[in-house]
């Protein structure tokens, strides 16, 4: 039987003298003026504060003037595809000769490689522009220079070694860049170039329209790339979600249609759960070109066709993925792995594009680091790792780097390639290492609660102000509150018992709560008992009425 509470609770604020809104702003390190109305342009920094932006603009203007042949090199995820789309739209508007190359996830790996430079040569490229990648492409850029191709890098990934010898390296995260905000995604960096270049070449009204016209894509990439929704990103997403909701871009309209989102307000959740997966699936199972063609399409018919194909691929992806996850869950139980503090699972024939989803799902379920492996075409094993806050996976892996062909990543995610002969040594040594490092308490997931709220403080007008602190997402988490000592009056199963609806009573009022996927909790609670309930406040629209709804995260029986 399920025992409540499910998680370790941590209440951030216990000072009841502050208002709920002040507490929520404080907890997110946001100032009071966060709730003030603002114009987008007020929140955007001068694009020339990005190092090398002047050089990039000059070189592109030269290419436009001399009618040079330009190639854009992007990436296969949403950010990479959107960044490529934006650059192509810019050059099409400027009547330039532009080509693109997107790497193939399975055969090319990540980032600009010499093979792609050769392809650019075949296109007679004079100017090669990398977007959402390039900061580590020192060898490929050298090869391009040798072939007489100038390179501009527009990236946001951290600098590791020496910079590539490019004409311009525009990246807020390169070491010498003092740009005030480091959280831009790849498409955000491209948008800064639009700003810098657009001011110079377009008439004022054309410039404004050009910037507004592409805000939907920038918001899409910013949310999908999971960069912090703060400062510039917050402003871009706040406005960009409105454009995503109203956009006439055929590719997005059709993508919304197959996702069941037509005429709905687009939120970060809608992007993360519905739109982004249908774009990413192209690169995971087929080719990212398909997604690029969707976003580039000017025709409804073409967009309709591609969106349908992506939707079918996504359904296929979900089926395959469920089967992998079940196999992985079985491995954890069957192989006596259950007590280990890291789970290393292998599927000989899993699609390489999906192993990151497998490790992510197992990590969420068991709250410990997970690496999912599959075999690649050379007979090596590729692994995709996902980890928790308490275990820096890439640092941990670096202790074993001599065993790997390649590896890399950051705190919570990493990838690696290992030969078959080294795999078993790695599996046993890394398991012992994690077992000795990770403590029991590191494996319990915690629930961060903003503050305690009293029944008389909670109403729909407060919830509306709370909603206005959003859009919520990475770097601005959705507020979580706790009501204490409230009486459980009734429970109703929803969707054949998959979800549960609760009626609580407190302060002489009823409060409706819903626990999504919480069907199992029915036997863990009892009528007329008193509970402390942790929830996200929300407003439920029903027959034109706005009702307060507690979206339940966890609960426990109150102490007397
Ligand atoms: Mn990116």
Image (cartoon, rainbow, N blue to C red):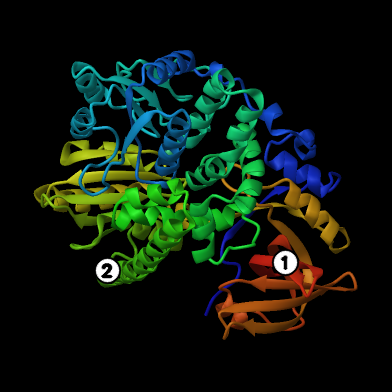
Q: Nearer the viewer, residue 424 or 346?
A: 346
- At x 83%, y 61%, the residue is 460
User: As drawn, is 240 to the left or to the right of 298?
Assistant: right
Residue occupying image coordinates x 55% and y 39%: 214
Residue 199 lies left or right of residue 395; in this view the side is right
Earlier-in-chain disc, 1 versus 2: 2
Residue 9 vs residue 37: left or right?
Answer: left
- Estimate the x, y position of residue 236 in percent, counting from the top left: 62, 38
**SS at mark 1 in the image:** strand
Question: Relative to 247, does residue 88 appear above or below in the rendering?
Answer: above
Where does residue 527 sit, x and y in percent of width and height? 73, 84
Question: Could you tell me which quadrant the C terminus lies in?
Answer: bottom right
The residue tagged with tag 2: helix, strand or loop? Answer: helix
**Circle 2 residues within 10 Å: few <14, some 14–19, many ≥20:** some
- Between 45 and 441, the one lying in front of the other is 45
Dot 1: within a 10 Å radius of its alpha carbon, few (fewer than 14), some, or many (20 or more) residues? many
Res 516 visible? yes
**Residue drawn at (28%, 21%) of the image:** 126
- Using the image as rendered, state which of residue 22 and residue 141 is in the foreground: 141
- How far is disc 1 from disc 2 in space, using C-alphas? 37 Å
Instruction: Give x and y (percent) for residue 351.
Output: 25, 59
Which labelled disc corresponds to residue 550?
Answer: 1
User: In which of the image's four quarters is ligand 1 placed?
Assistant: top left
Does 493 appear above or below 354?
A: below
Q: Is residue 400 visible?
A: no
Percent across and percent down for residue 359 are 35, 57
In this view, the mark in front (1 or 2): 1
Residue 1 left/right relative to 348: right
Residue pictured at 20% horizontal, 27% vertical: 121
Question: Which residue is the site of mark 2?
Answer: 331
């Amino acid at each position: 039987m399920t025992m409540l509470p499910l998680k370790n609770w941590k209440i951030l604020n216990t000072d009841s003298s502050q208002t709920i809104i002040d507490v929520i702003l404080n907890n997110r390190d946001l100032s009071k003026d966060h709730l003030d109305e603002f114009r987008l342009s007020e929140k955007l920094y001068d694009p020339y504060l990005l190092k090398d932006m002047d050089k990039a603009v000059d070189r592109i203007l030269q290419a436009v003037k001399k009618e040079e042949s330009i190639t854009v090199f992007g990436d296969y995820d949403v950010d990479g595809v959107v960044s490529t789309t934006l650059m192509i739209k810019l050059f099409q508007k400027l009547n330039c000769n532009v080509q693109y190359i997107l790497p193939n996830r399975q055969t090319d790996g990540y980032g600009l490689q010499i093979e792609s430079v050769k392809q650019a040569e075949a296109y007679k490229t004079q100017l090669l522009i990398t977007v959402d990648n390039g900061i580590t492409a020192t060898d490929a850029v050298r090869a391009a220079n040798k072939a007489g191709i100038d390179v501009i890098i527009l990236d946001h990934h951290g600098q590791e070694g020496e910079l590539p010898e490019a004409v311009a390296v525009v990246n807020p995260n390169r070491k010498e860049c003092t740009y005030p905000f480091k959280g831009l995604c790849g498409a955000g960096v491209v948008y800064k170039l639009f700003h810098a270049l657009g001011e110079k070449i377009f008439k004022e009204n054309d410039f404004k329209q050009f910037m507004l016209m592409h805000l939907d894509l920038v918001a899409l990439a910013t949310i999908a790339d999971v960069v912090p929704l703060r400062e510039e990103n917050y402003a871009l997403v706040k406005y960009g979600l409105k454009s995503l909701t109203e956009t006439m871009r055929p590719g997005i309209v059709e993508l919304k249609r197959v996702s069941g989102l037509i005429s709905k307000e687009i939120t970060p959740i809608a992007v993360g759960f519905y739109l982004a997966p249908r774009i990413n699936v192209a690169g995971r199972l087929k080719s990212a070109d398909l997604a690029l063609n969707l976003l580039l399409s000017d025709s409804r018919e073409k967009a309709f066709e591609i969106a349908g194909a992506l939707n079918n691929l996504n359904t296929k992806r979900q089926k395959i993925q469920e089967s992998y996850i079940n196999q992985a869950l079985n491995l954890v139980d069957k192989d006596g792995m259950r007590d280990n503090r890291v789970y290393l699972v292998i599927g000989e024939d899993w699609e390489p594009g999906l192993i990151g989803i497998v490790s992510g799902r197992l990590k969420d379920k068991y709250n410990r680091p997970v690496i999912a492996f599959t075999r690649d075409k050379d007979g090596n094993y590729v692994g995709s790792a996902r980890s928790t806050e308490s275990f820096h996976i890439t640092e941990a892996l670096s202790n074993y780097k001599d065993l790997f062909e390649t590896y890399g990543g950051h705190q919570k995610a990493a990838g690696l390639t290992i030969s078959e002969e080294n795999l078993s040594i790695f599996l046993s040594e890394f398991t012992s290492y994690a077992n000795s490092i990770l403590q029991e308490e590191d494996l319990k997931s915690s629930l961060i609660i903003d503050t305690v709220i009293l029944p008389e403080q909670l109403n729909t007008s407060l919830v509306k102000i709370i909603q206005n602190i959003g859009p919520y997402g990475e770097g601005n988490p959705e507020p979580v509150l706790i009501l204490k000592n409230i009486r459980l009056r009734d429970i109703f199963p929803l969707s054949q018992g998959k979800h549960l609806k609760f009626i609580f009573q407190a302060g002489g009022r009823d409060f409706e709560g819903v626990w999504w996927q919480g069907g199992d909790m029915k036997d863990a609670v009892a009528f007329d008992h008193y509970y402390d309930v942790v929830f996200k406040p929300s407003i439920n629209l029903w027959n034109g009425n706005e009702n307060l709804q507690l979206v339940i995260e966890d609960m426990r029986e109150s102490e007397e």
